[in-house]
Every structure is written in C-alpha cells, then in structure tokens.
Image (tube, rainbow, N blue to C red):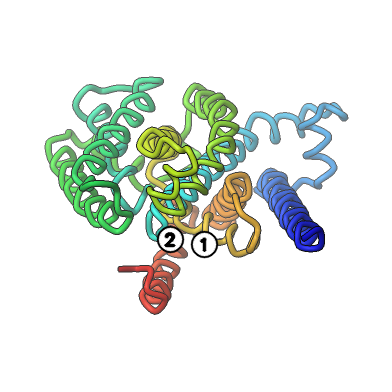
C-alpha cells in the first residue's frame, strides 16, 4: 500500500510540474509575441529598445513615442482580448464537455454584438456605454440559451444546438439593425463587426484589464468544481458540489469576459475555439488549463494581428485573419469530433 500511495503522489507531482512548466512556457511565448508586436512596423525596433522603453530603463523620446503612444495600446488590446477569449473558451468547452462549445460559436458573442450594434446604431452610444451594453447582451443571450437547453439538467450537445439557433437569430437582428441605420452608423457598425484589436478606446481597455485581474483568479478557484462537473451531475453532487450554482458561475464568468472582449475588439472569431484545445494538448495529461488557454489565446491573437497589419499586402482587420485560419480548423475539428463520437 505505501508503494501505491507513493506512486500516486509521484504521479500527481509530475502532472503538477508539467502543468506549471507548460503554462510558464506559454506565458513566455505570449510575452515574446507581445514584445515582437511592438518591434515591427514602419520603424523597426530592437527587443532591447522596446523592453527599455516599457520598463523605463532607458529614456529616448522618439522610441518612447513609438512604443508607448503608438504601439503599446494595440499590443495590450490584443494581449488582453486574446487572454479573455482563451479563458472563456476553455471554461465553456470543459463545462459542456465538447470542443465545439466556444462562446463565439454558440451565440454569446452574437448577443454581445446585437447589443453593441443597437447601441451604436439606435442610441449613438460611445465610451463605456458600448462595453456595458455588450456585456448585457452576452448575459441575456446566455440566459436565453440556458433556459431553452435546460431539461432535467444541462446537456452540452443540446446547449450547443440551442446556441447555434440563438446565434442565427442574433445575426438576423444585426442585419435588420444595419438596414435601418444611416450610412455613417452602418459603416461604423460593420467595421466593429469584422473585429479589430486596433479600435479599442483606453476606457474600454482599462475596464477589460481590471475585470481580467478580478475574474481570472476566480476562474482558477472554480477549477475544482469544474473537474467535479466533468464527472457528471450525480457524482458531482456526491462530492459535495452544488451543481446548478457551480454551473451558473462557470457560465456567467466566461460570458462577462466574452462580452467585454467583444466590446473592446468586436466579435473576433475562432480564438476562443482554438485556444482551449491547443492548451489541452500541450498540457495532457495534466488537468486544468485556464492560464495556459489564456496565454495561448493571447499569443494567437497577437500573431494574427501582426499578420493582418504587416505580412499581407494590404492592412486588414484582425478578424479577417482569425476567420481565415479558424474556418479550416473548425472543419477539421468537426471531422475529428465525429470520428471520436464527440460531435454528437
């Protein structure tokens, strides 16, 4: 018996060590992409120049202007939005036990889009009003899906099907709002709907950063309840988990994150869908992955933004690149999930 106990403890230690190492490496990759995004541009800078300006080690007015005033806001937007998308995506996927259960795929982002576009087109909203309305829209959409999908418990597959229907309805509402808008408001709304990390204002970005600092530790604390829910409702109740309250918290938290991320950058597609499975493959068989998925989402969005701005012949919104890369991934994921019996 001591030998078995020692082996179990050794296995847990190895898994914990792998989780820490993989998460740390992904964090370094995300930070490297963050720095690189401020190095490239019409004026190329060295990594030392960027780091010196960021941490105020060196003082050069020209470099400080390029780094702090011109490039840091967009890089910070890509970092925080990508992190929020990665965290929200992996929470949804783990809770519903389905790799297709990303917030942007099941209607949460569409709900945020409807509210934000309504604010822009109907009420002429700006500043903090747009992110506030986006969060409300995401919450309303999530509650609607939860009510429609709940039948003596919540089935991940049923939730996804309901979410796809809600998403189609919300997209129709967005189209109707655009047809009723004047040309200026319609252009502004269409630019926002494509998704671009360069359109965030300082107020919206600051709100997202504060919410991330507040909610990511909560998400990490909820990992224990999440692992219990993955065993099924009956076993989770046997382990002392208040199933419906835990599920409500685990849905509400990513909904708030996706609503704010959508308000800051528009509905960036596929990052939330991709980040969780990539992080899970790197962590396997270690459990968890909230931070790892967040760092993966941040790195993916930073690199997609660099491609959109500097690699393509014409500068494009970030959402165009994530959509072009994410669509083939979605087709591959659907085919793989069906072969493995996960896709329903």
Q: Nearer the viewer, residue 88 or 194?
A: 88
Task: State yes or no: discs 1 and 2 in contact (Cβ < 8 Å).
Answer: no
- Neighbor class of circle 1 (other Cα within 10 Å; few <14, some 14-19, many 20+) is few
Q: Which residue is mark 1?
A: 313
For residue 38, side relative to residue 200 (left or right): right
Outermost residue toward the bottom in this view: 339
Q: Which residue is mark 2?
A: 99
Is the C terminus in the top left, top right, bottom left or bottom right quadrant? bottom left
Q: CA distance from mark 1 to mark 2?
A: 34 Å
Is any part of residue 318 visible from this angle? no
Measured along the vertical axis of the image, is residue 294 above or below residue 128? below
For residue 62, side relative to residue 320 (left or right): right
For residue 48, side relative to residue 143 (left or right): right
Q: Position of residue 30 (x, y in %)?
A: 67, 49
Local SS, label 2:
loop
Q: Position of residue 343 (x, y in %)?
A: 34, 68
Considering only order in the chain, which callout, 2 or 1, is on the residue closer to the N terminus?
A: 2
Q: Residue at horizontal 38%, vertical 27%?
A: 131
Outermost residue toward the right in this view: 57
Picture quadrant of residue 190 = top left
Is any part of residue 153 visible from this angle? yes
Local SS, label 1:
loop
Marker disc for residue 152: none
**Number of numbered discs:** 2
Q: Nearer the viewer, residue 62 or 166?
A: 166
Q: Position of residue 332 (x, y in %)?
A: 42, 74
């Amino acid at each position: 018996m001591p030998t078995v106990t020692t082996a179990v403890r050794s296995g847990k230690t190895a898994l914990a060590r792998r989780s820490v190492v993989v998460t740390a490496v992904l964090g370094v990759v995300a930070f490297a992409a963050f720095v690189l995004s401020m190095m490239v541009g019409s004026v190329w800078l060295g990594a030392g120049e960027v780091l010196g300006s960021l941490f105020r080690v060196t003082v050069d007015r020209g470099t400080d202007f390029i780094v702090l005033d011109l490039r840091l806001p967009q890089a910070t937007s890509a970092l925080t939005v990508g992190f929020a998308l990665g965290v929200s995506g992996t929470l949804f996927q783990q809770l519903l036990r389905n790799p297709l259960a990303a917030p942007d795929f099941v209607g949460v982002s569409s709900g945020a889009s409807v509210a934000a576009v309504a604010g822009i087109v109907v009420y002429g909203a700006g500043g903090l009003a747009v992110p506030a309305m986006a969060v409300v829209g995401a919450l309303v959409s999530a509650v609607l899906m939860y009510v429609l999908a709940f039948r003596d418990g919540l089935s991940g597959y049923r939730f996804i099907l309901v979410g796809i229907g809600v998403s189609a309805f919300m997209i129709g509402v967005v189209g109707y709002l655009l047809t009723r808008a004047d040309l200026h408001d319609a252009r502004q709304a269409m630019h926002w709907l494509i998704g671009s990390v360069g359109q965030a204002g300082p107020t919206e970005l600051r709100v997202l950063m504060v919410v991330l600092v507040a909610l990511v530790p909560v998400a990490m604390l909820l990992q224990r309840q999440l692992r219990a829910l993955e065993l099924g409702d009956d076993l989770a109740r046997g382990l002392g988990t208040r199933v419906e309250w835990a599920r409500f918290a685990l849905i509400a938290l990513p909904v708030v994150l996706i609503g704010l991320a959508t308000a800051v950058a528009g509905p960036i597609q596929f990052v939330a869908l991709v980040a969780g499975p990539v992080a899970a493959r790197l962590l396997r068989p270690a459990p968890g992955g909230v931070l790892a998925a967040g760092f993966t989402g941040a790195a993916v969005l930073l690199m997609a933004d660099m491609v959109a701005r500097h690699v393509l012949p014409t500068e494009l919104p970030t959402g165009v690149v994530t959509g072009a890369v994410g669509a083939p991934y979605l087709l591959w994921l659907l085919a793989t999930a069906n072969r493995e019996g996960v896709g329903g």
